[in-house]
Amino acid sequence: MINKLFQITIVLILFFNLSKVVIAEENQNLANFIIRNYESTVLPVVGSSDADFTIIEFFDYRCGYCSKQANDFQRLLINSDNVKIIYMEWPIFGDISETAAKIALIVWQTNPQLYFDVHNQFMKLGPKMKKESIVKVLNELDLNGNDIFQEAVSQNSNKIIEENIKLAHSLGLRGTPASIINDSIYPGYIQYKTLETLIK
């Protein structure tokens, strides 16, 4: 009899705790759920901290459609105070793209208020991006372009970028841009009119 009561008690405790986990997960959208293992300050975030709409974007600075997406996201942030965008550096083209991604993350860590400016200026460089143009962008923002560039080049690897790559692959993403808006994944470029509809 005692053993039976003990078993029933254990079952009830397990059921109660499982119910709490399910409720917690139901209250969290996919966008926020998939970045749960990142430290809260490592990913670049722009927009309202208590927004109802969370957008996660995977991108490469030399991707032409990523540049178009950057323009539309910038416009969206200007026109809506109910959106936040989390930027996932995913330099699929390698080489200078990877260096630019590392530089952007260095800026986020040291001068987070300038990240959005750096991000948008790098996007404008696009496929023509070179060391000289990157350094020029940084210098125009009163950053030491040459030092930051060399710091990025000297990094053998970047843990955040490595985690971003793993996450992109686990989500089945095949290219950039790719976005997650709350609970839905959108591969490819999303036109501004569509973005407006999605956040209403």
Image (cartoon, rainbow, N blue to C red):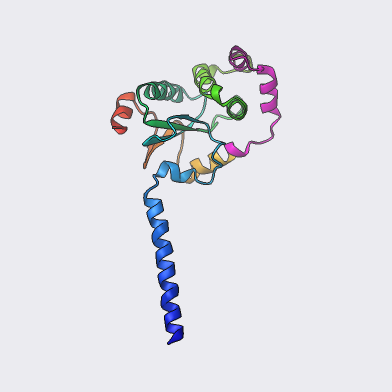
Q: Which residue sits at x=43%, y=75%?
A: 9
Image location of residue 79, percent across then percent down: 35, 22
Vertical placement of residue 149 versus 30, above or below: above
Q: How many marks?
A: 0
Q: Which residue sits at x=45%, y=79%?
A: 6
Which is more toward the observer, 165 or 74?
74
Horizontally, residue 61 falls left or right of residue 31, namely: right
Dominant SS of magenta comes to helix
Image location of residue 71, percent across then percent down: 42, 20
* The residue stretch that appears in magenta: 134-161
Choose top left, top right, bottom left or bottom right for residue 85: top left
Q: Quadrant of the image for the N terminus?
A: bottom left
Image location of residue 22, percent across then percent down: 39, 57
Q: Is residue 69 visible?
A: yes
Q: Quadrant of the image for the C terminus?
A: top left
Choose top left, top right, bottom left or bottom right for residue 184: top left
Which is more toward the observer, 16 or 191?
16
Vertical placement of residue 35 versus 91, above or below: below
Vertical placement of residue 16 versus 80, above or below: below
Q: Is residue 171 visible?
A: no
Q: Does residue 156 belong to the magenta stretch?
A: yes
Horizontally, residue 156 falls left or right of residue 84, namely: right
Q: Which residue sits at x=42%, y=32%?
A: 84
Choose top left, top right, bottom left or bottom right for residue 66: top left
Q: Does residue 143 belong to the magenta stretch?
A: yes
Image location of residue 171, percent across then percent down: 45, 44
